[in-house]
Amino acid sequence: MAHPYHHAVSSAKKWGGEPAEFEAIHAWFDESKAAFGDFRHRALRHHAFGIFECEQVFGSTLTLSTGRLVPVRVIGEQHVMEDCGRIPTVQDWLSSITAERWMNSPARLSRLLRGDADVW
Ligand SMILES: [Zn+2]
């Protein structure tokens, strides 16, 4: 599994500048690994919506020490392509979740609203 630093080295080879200039963006994509230790952490940010979210966090362009402007979106696309081989959608990830009963349990809410159940 690629470390954010290795993605940053790849970015610097592609667009110039130093790897450190790209590390914050690549680290942002992989922060979710702190919550879930295997590749499934990617479901939280490694998709088209995550790339646009990255742009909201870091702005539309990254200005390198060379003066070159690099669109943040294409840096995000590079990261996701290197990890997943394509740009999946949120739907691609979520539709792979096996439904569990607890994920959709409106009966509890209706019982609470009728007063038949305690609040948690
Ligand atoms: Zn990643």
Image (tube, rainbow, N blue to C red):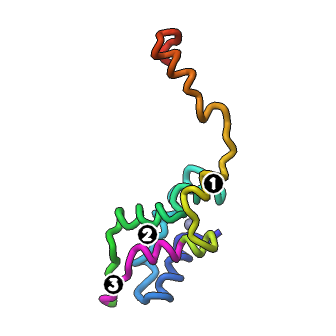
What is the crowding at mark 3: few (fewer than 14 residues within 10 Å), some, or many (at least 20)?
few
Q: Looking at the image, is mark 3 or mark 1 earlier in the sequence?
A: 1
| Residue shown at the point (32%, 69%) measured from the top left | 59
The amino acid type of the residue labelled 3 equals Leu
Q: Quadrant of residue 106?
A: top right
Magenta region's main secondary structure? helix
11 to 93, vertically: above or below? below
Q: Determine whether, in the image, residue 24 is placed left or right of residue 65.
A: right
Q: Of circles 3 and 1, which is in front?
A: 3
Mark 1: give few (<14), some (14-19) or many (20+) Cα within 10 Å.
few
**Mark 2 or mark 3: which comes first in sequence?**
2
Q: Which residues are magenta?
A: 67-79
Q: Is residue 2 left or right of residue 111?
A: right
Q: Could you tell me which secondary element the residue under label 2 belongs to?
A: helix
Q: Which residue is mark 1?
A: 37
Q: Measuring 65% from the left and 68% from the top, which residue is drawn there?
A: 1
Is disc 3 placed on a helix, strand or loop? strand
Q: Which amino acid type is marked by label 2? A: Ile
In the rendered image, the vertical position of residue 102 relative to residue 3, given as above or below: above
Between the residue at mark 3 and the residue at mark 1, the CA separation in whole angstroms equals 33 Å
User: What mark, if any, has residue 25 been given in the picture?
Assistant: 2
The quarter of the image that holds ligand 1 is: bottom right
**Which kind of residue does numbered mark 1 sit on?**
Gly
Look at mark 3 in the image and give the residue it sits on.
69
Residue 92 versus residue 87 in the image, above or below? above
Residue 53: x, y in percent?
Answer: 41, 61
